Image (spheres, rainbow, N blue to C red):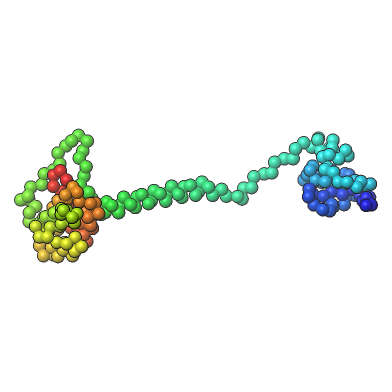
Amino acid sequence: MTPSPNWQVRHLGMPEGQPLENAERVLEGLRDGDWDPSDDVRGPGEIDWRQIEDHPHFADAVAEMGPPPPEPPDESRLDMNPMIDVALVLLIFFILTATYTSLRRTIDLPPAPSEDGAAKQVVKKEDIQDRVFRVKVNLDTNGTAIVKIDDRPVALADIDRELKDHVRTTGRKEMHLTVADDVPWGTEAKIYDAARGAEIHQIYWPKGK
C-alpha cells in the first residue's frame, strides 16, 4: 500500500479520510471543532491510522487545548413531562368533581347539623299541608322498592310520570320524602331526578333522616 503524501483526517469509524495540505490544517480543524481528538489521522509516509490525540505530532497540542466545551442545551426542545403530569392531575380532578356533582344532582341534600349542635328548623304540618304531598320509599322482603305517593302505591319505573301527573293534578310542588335506611342510594337518586323533572322546588326530610 502506497502512503499518501498529504495529511489525512477521517471521522471515527469512517472508511476514508479527507486530505489536508499540512499539519497546521489538522490543528486548525481541531480548534474550529471540525475534528475531535478521537478522530483518526495519518501523516505523509504513514500507513496506519492513529487517533489525533495519540499522534506524536499533535499530542501536546491536544493536551493544551483541554477537553472540548460542552454542547449548548437545545432550547428548541420542549419537555412534555411536566405538562403531561399536570394534565393527568386535572383530568382526575374533573372526573371526581363530575362524579360528585352527578350524585348530588341539582336538588341539594339536607344541610348537615352545625358544629354547635343547634336544632334544625321545625316545619309545622298545618303550614305546608296545602302545598306539600308525601312520598315514602321502603323495601319489601324481596328487596324491591315500594314507592307511595300520598299512600298510593306506584311503580318505581313509572315514578317520573307519576310525579308529573300528581303535581299537575294537585298543584303541589313541594314534597315530603321519607326513605327507609335500607333503600339503596340509586333508588333515592331516581326519586330526586324525577322530582327535578316534575319541577318540584322543595323537598322536606323527616327528622332523623
Q: Residue furthest front?
A: 142
Q: Is residue 45 visible?
A: yes
Query: Residue 74 or 193: which is nearer the viewer?
Result: 193
Query: Residue 111 or 40: which is nearer the viewer?
Result: 40
**Residue 80 horizontal side relative to residue 4, left or right:** left
For residue 27, above or below residue 195: above
Quadrant assignment for the C terminus: top left
Quarter-of-image position of residue 71: top right
Q: Residue at x 80, y 52 (%)?
A: 14
**Residue 43 horizontal side relative to residue 100, left or right:** right
Q: Residue at x 28, y 52 (%)?
A: 103
Where residue 47 sits in the image (x, y, percent)?
A: 91, 47
Where residue 154 sits in the image (x, y, percent)?
A: 14, 61
Where residue 63 sits in the image (x, y, percent)?
A: 81, 35
Q: Is residue 172 visible?
A: no
Q: How many marks?
A: 0
Q: Residue at x 88, y 39 (%)?
A: 57
Quarter-of-image position of residue 140: bottom left
Where residue 81 sits in the image (x, y, percent)?
A: 53, 47
Q: Residue at x 21, y 38 (%)?
A: 114
Query: Residue 12 or 25: which is nearer the viewer?
Result: 12
